[in-house]
Image (cartoon, grey):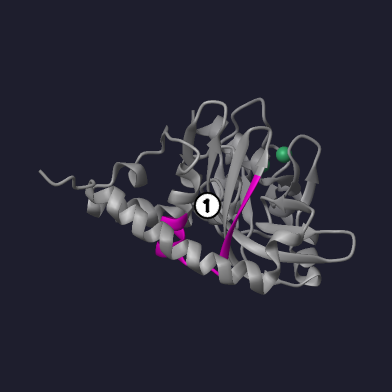
Amino acid sequence: MIFKPLKYEKYADKICRKLTEFQDGFKKEYDIDNYANWFYNQSSETLRLYSDDKEVYFKYIPVGTFSQKTNTWMWAWANKDSVEPRKFRTLKVKEFGEKKKYDNLTNAHFDGDKYTGWELTSIAFDIIGGIGTYRVISEHLEKYFLLTEQITKEEAEKIESELIECSIHGKIRKAFICQHLNTESKTGFEEAFETYRGMELDEDDDFQAWCSECEKERLKTDGWNDYSMEFAQIKLVCERCYFGIKELNSK
Ligand SMILES: [Zn+2]
Ligand SMILES: [Zn+2]
């Protein structure tokens, strides 16, 4: 009998080779291995690589994480702690996996080994695309990125300047709520449009929500006016606080 690798293994092997080849060129072009430090920001999805004398910035899509402690992989789309807006792009990999019946591409998390992270990142890169890939390790957690484009320091700073500093959640995207919404009691939760955690927003859109009482005022005048705005006293919160309040109200 001839040994035949499983269909998935064969596929994964081919894709890994393809990425390795591609990645060699990418590393050379950006001198990727010669930066001493890294820093990434989930909300702006920017990765900065830097040394004393040089730095480079990229926009990224998170692929997933591999825990060296539990030896398990988790896809970015399944990671409730991550606030990266583009993490749901990895659902494209899941869709592909559903068609092909590849469990590793459809299960949220599963056991793996030291090759798992790169294998799945190669597949994500093949399906979603990008200019290269990168991995960082901190506290036994490997985090994998698809780098989609290089950006300038000014562009990275502009993205960051649009974030707010939440005392609980750190530097993160902003959201707007009426003065009555809070983390302790249910007040009703009306939104400008349907939202979900980590969703991508168009440039002109913001997360905006208000309570049932504000909605009553708003409907009286068929939309926001000076009076209902005065009643609402819209204030700024962070994205995670916003979704915390939304969840509280949907319980
Ligand atoms: Zn209100
Ligand atoms: Zn917050």
Q: Residues within 10 Å of mark 1 (few under 14, many from 20)?
A: many
* Above/below status of 51 relative to 42: below
The residue to which callout 1 is attached is 87
The answer to whether one can see residue 22 in this image is: yes
* Above/below status of 179 relative to 20: above
The quarter of the image holding the N terminus is top left
The image shows a total of numbered marks equal to 1
- Residues drawn in magenta: 122-136
The residue under the point 66% across, 50% down is 42
Q: Residue furthest front?
A: 1
The front one of 51 and 145 is 51
Residue 98 percent location from the top left of the image: 27, 50
Residue 159 percent location from the top left of the image: 74, 63
Q: Residue furthest left?
A: 1
Q: Amino acid at mark 1?
A: Lys
Check mark 1 vs ligand 2: CB closer than 8 Å? yes or no.
Answer: no
Label 1 element class: helix
Q: Quadrant of ligand 2?
A: top right
Magenta region includes residue 13: no
Q: Residue furthest right?
A: 52
The residue under the point 57% across, 38% down is 246
